[in-house]
Image (cartoon, helix red, strand yellow):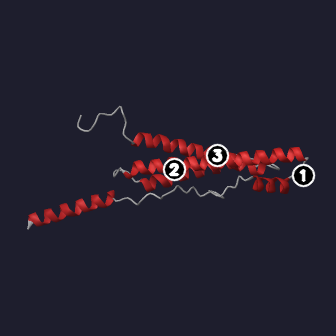
Amino acid sequence: MLRSVVALLSLSLLSALAAAQDHAPMPPSLVIGYEDEGKVDASEKSCRAFVVDMVEWEKAEMDQAVKDVCVYRQKHIDAYAKLQAAYTDFRAVLSEQTRFDGAVAARHVAAIIKNCIDMKWALSTGGHNIGTDMIPHAIATECLDLGRDLLQKETANLGPRDDQPAGGE
């Protein structure tokens, strides 16, 4: 009888430990949750439409403003793509791990990036004329880069390292 109770308790404990290791799957892409995330349009047509609606300047100034707006938008798009690529690598390394909760880590890194954007926006005047478009893109770019750097460092820390001895050594 005592052996049955011990065996049952052991199985219960092992089951509980196994359940603790069953983590939710990581999302396929990292969703930050900021306005227009992943929907930035850096086409000349879109940039020109914004500039024409915002200011009435000489043609040369308008053309330069369109280029400037497009540059900021494109940097935002590029930063978002690089963040997603870093997340893909991070996710791949974590898929080989059973000790960590990647879904929770993903939520936290998204929150770090979102909080960065919110903090920087709180410290911004928002700009005027074409700056009202450029400043949000500059802020997003900086925070996406911060998130990308964090993911790259954590991916490197989680992956195999040359300075660690092989198993059993």
**Horizontal side, residue 126 vs residue 36: left or right:** right
Question: Which residue does the numbered mark 2 point to in the structure image?
Answer: 109
Which quadrant of the figure has residue 2? bottom left
Q: Residue at x 57, y 43 (%)?
A: 146
Residue type at tag 1: Glu
Q: Secondary structure at mark 1?
A: loop
Q: Secondary structure at mark 2?
A: helix
Residue at the spot of label 1:
56
Q: Residue 138 or 109: which is nearer the viewer?
A: 138
The answer to which of marks 1 and 3 sits earlier in the sequence is 1
Q: CA distance from mark 3 to mark 2?
A: 15 Å
Instruction: Tell me the CA gap for discs 1 and 3.
Output: 28 Å
Label 3 SS: helix
Give the spatial CA distance, label 1 vs label 2: 41 Å
Q: Nearer the viewer, mark 1 or mark 2?
A: 1
Residue 123 to residue 161: above or below: below
Where is residue 70? Give x, y as percent.
Answer: 74, 48
Q: Residue furthest front?
A: 44
Label pair 1/2, CB-CB below 8 angstroms:
no
The answer to whether residue 133 is above or below residue 149 is below
Q: Image height check: is 57 above or below 6?
A: above
Label 2 packing within 10 angstroms: few (<14), some (14-19), many (20+):
many
Q: Residue sitting at 77 percent across and 55 percent down?
A: 45
The x and y percentages for residue 159 are: 39, 42
Point out which mark residue 141 bears.
3
- Amino acid beneath label 2: Val
Q: Are marks 1 and 3 in contact (CB under 8 Å)?
A: no
Residue 13 is tagged as none
